Image: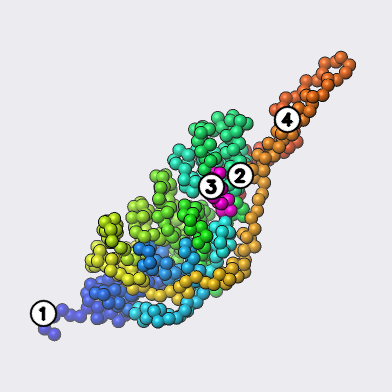
Amino acid sequence: MSDSEAPPAVAPEGVSGAPGLSQEALEIASGYAFAGPALDLGALLWDGRSLPDARIRIPLPVLNRHGLVAGATGTGKTKTLQLIAEQLSVQGVPVFLADIKGDVSGISAPGVSNDKVLARAQEVHQEWTPTACPAEFYALGGMGRGIPVRATVTSFGPVLLSKVLQLNQTQEQSLGLIFHYADQKGLELFDLKDLRAVVTFLTSDEGKAELKGIGGLSPATAGVILRSLTAFEAQGMSPFFGEPEFDTSELLRTASDGRGMVSVLELPEVQDKPQLFSTFLMWMLVDLFHDLPEVGDLDKPKLVFFFDEAHLLFTGASKAFLESITQTVRLIRSKGVGVFFVTQTPKDVPSDVLAQLGNRVQHALRAFTPDDQKALKATVKTFPNSAYDLEEVLTGMGTGEAVVTVLSEKGAPTPVAATRLRAPQSLMGPVDPAALDRAVRASPLYGRYAQAVDRESAYEKLAARDAAAAQAAAQAAAEAGRAPAKGGGRAKEEPSVVEQVVGSGIFKSLARSMGTQIGREITRSLFGTARRRR
């Protein structure tokens, strides 16, 4: 070797078979040579070649530091989620996945070997073995295949409900006052007809006095809310609200062999209701946040929650709503939950939320239009300094390739690494519908949630009140039609209609039911969701 020749690069500890790498590639690879447990994403890409012995990984303990999986349609985001979910399950970490297109159910079945899968496994030195994961399947309100997931209106709260009703900020605040009134009066809001009954009462002649007592709530705004609610019900939204309410702690379960349960929320039947399912996902996350204790940093997360189609949550959101999301994401980390937002470009996620995400898997972006080019440049700026020309790399990557940067075991960002991703070992596609149905009905949770329950709540109580008033009015009319008593004595003064209503047995029963709950107003969170189960 002449004096002018550089010595060969030496592989850092943990990077096997890497002495042939260039100095830049070695520096990148060394950033992923973690000592503790980690998930394997794939092999480093450098100069257009896959370097299978330079493994790109995510340390297991930092998965509660949240993340982003982004990329244009068809670039492999869903398969990346499947790849990460499989490995988390093996490590005993439960996973939640939203299945928008209906092709994630295959995680419950072993994969099928073919030339493409075997070629990818060889390119990244992956020992590929067909493997199924333990899985539960859910469906919002029982719409579609899966164990029904419902929320009570009280638990959902006024802020999240305003999002799905598409109310403006003033109407959102007014809806909050209606919830406050119902809480104080002991009118339980389990389903949509309960809420509609309360708003109908407040906008009626009988409820005008009550409406005046709710500061800041005008009859016009209450009428708008009632019309929005009625239209919402007319669109078939009622099944999503009611009882039995889904207990989100079910998502934290492990299988009998110690593997983490993969909870798949099947959403193909509600693809045309994006505001609803994205807000329901946020409700699940907020409910977990309320119930879980503080645990700090753990050796592995309690749950990793993949929030698909994340841009739908943020579109049209109020400032207060975004602030609440940011605070929830920031604080839920200390409760052992990691959240990965899945969307097309980082600009879909507000900067305050994006700042909370420590792990990034960025698939290819398109640059066909001026807007695409602007989004590409904005995406490149969100990455740390890189040895790559990221604009060129991000527009030239194929399906199943991505640019990765994660947090190291010490919490520092790793070098940006173009990566050829491993192949999932479960089925890359939907399972047979009949097999899915059998799995759902065999679940121990099916009997708990399958049948809807309609307990006495606001609707029944207000209906009983109306019935009591009608009965008293009819009785008063009958008494008024009778002749005065004989004997010349002064007839006893008849009680008024109001006195008869108040004195009726039905009304007294209703008053006792309501009176026992007055003063027990529900404590609500930043999102207005109930902070205790009822």
Q: Earlier in the sequence, mark 2 or mark 3?
A: 2
Disc 1 crowd, CA 10 A, few/some/many (<14, 14-19, 20+): few
**Which residue corresponds to mark 1?**
4
Alpha carbon separation for disc pair 2 and 3: 14 Å
Quarter where residue 391 is shown: bottom left
Across and down, in percent, residue 210 comes to: 59, 32
Residue 194: which numbered mark, if any? 2
Q: Does residue 490 sit above or below 4 in this rendering? A: above
Label 3 element class: helix
Specify whether residue 255 is in view: no
Question: Closest to the observer: 294 or 444?
Answer: 444
Magenta-colored span: 229-241
Specify whether residue 450 is in view: yes
Residue 473: which numbered mark, if any? 4
Alpha carbon separation for disc pair 1 and 3: 75 Å
Across and down, in percent, residue 474 comes to: 75, 31
Colour pattern = rainbow
Identify the amino acid type marked 4.
Ala
Quarter where residue 204 is shown: top right
**Which residue corresponds to mark 3?**
232
Alpha carbon separation for disc pair 2 and 1: 83 Å
| Of marks 4 and 1, the one in the foreground | 4
